Image (tube, grey):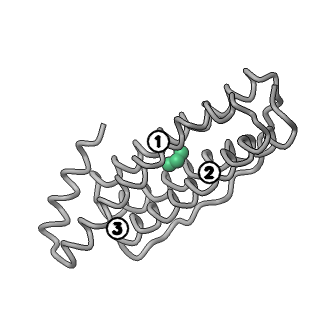
Amino acid sequence: MISPKIQDLLNAQLNREYSSSYAYLAMAAYVESESLVGFAHWLRVQHREELEHALKFYDYINAQNGRVTLAAIDQPRAEYKSVFEVFQKVLEHEKYITRSVNEIYGAAEAEKDYATKTFLSWFVSEQVEEESEAQLMVDKLAMIGDSKGSLLYLDKEAKKRE
Ligand code: FEO
């Protein structure tokens, strides 16, 4: 059983995961329009992962006999200056998601809601990975600067993401 407050916070996070998913798909569409199919693949994998995250919240709320409520998903930004800017935004977004997961974790802790804390532990670890992967991309893209050859090499590498 979860409190109405925790249920609201979990539903809000479910919506954030869908919004993340949609935002990453829009980023994929932008880089794909620039013929960077490897980065587009990377972002589509991210898009899919966010859908899986959203469904974890959906399943958990239901498992606790709560009520899932779906809210509108924000229209994502469509245009960027560069693939570098895209990944800077990915990193910024993941940091925002980390903060929101931590806030719910804190609320669950305050209520002694151990089940929700345990459920969220997976997301706490996942966010370390998400931020680290995004940071790595930002660092590599910063390193290559304006080199088109290096950008194409990184694009090829990004295609290998599973
Ligand atoms: Fe579901 Fe990228 O956090």
Amino acid marked by disc 2: Asn
Q: Identify the mark at residue 125; answer none if there is no mark.
A: 1
| Residue 160 shows up from this direction | yes
- Measured as percent of width and height from the top left, residue 92 is found at 49, 65
Query: Is disc 1 surrounded by few (<14), some (14 to 19) or many (20+) residues within 10 Å?
Result: few
Is 35 in front, or is 97? 97
Q: Which residue is under mark 2?
A: 102
Does residue 107 sit above or below 80 in this rendering?
above
Which quadrant of the view contains residue 77? Answer: bottom right
Q: Amino acid at mark 1?
A: Ser
**Residue at 77% across, 47% down:** 71
Q: Secondary structure at mark 2?
A: helix
Q: Nearer the viewer, mark 3 or mark 2?
A: 2
The residue where tag 3 is placed is 83
Residue 55 visible in image: no
Q: Is mark 2 within 8 Å of ligand 1?
A: no
Distance in Å between CA atoms under marks 2 and 1: 11 Å
| For the residues bearing labels 3 and 2, Cβ distance under 8 angstroms | no
Q: Residues within 10 Å of mark 3 (few under 14, many from 20)?
A: many
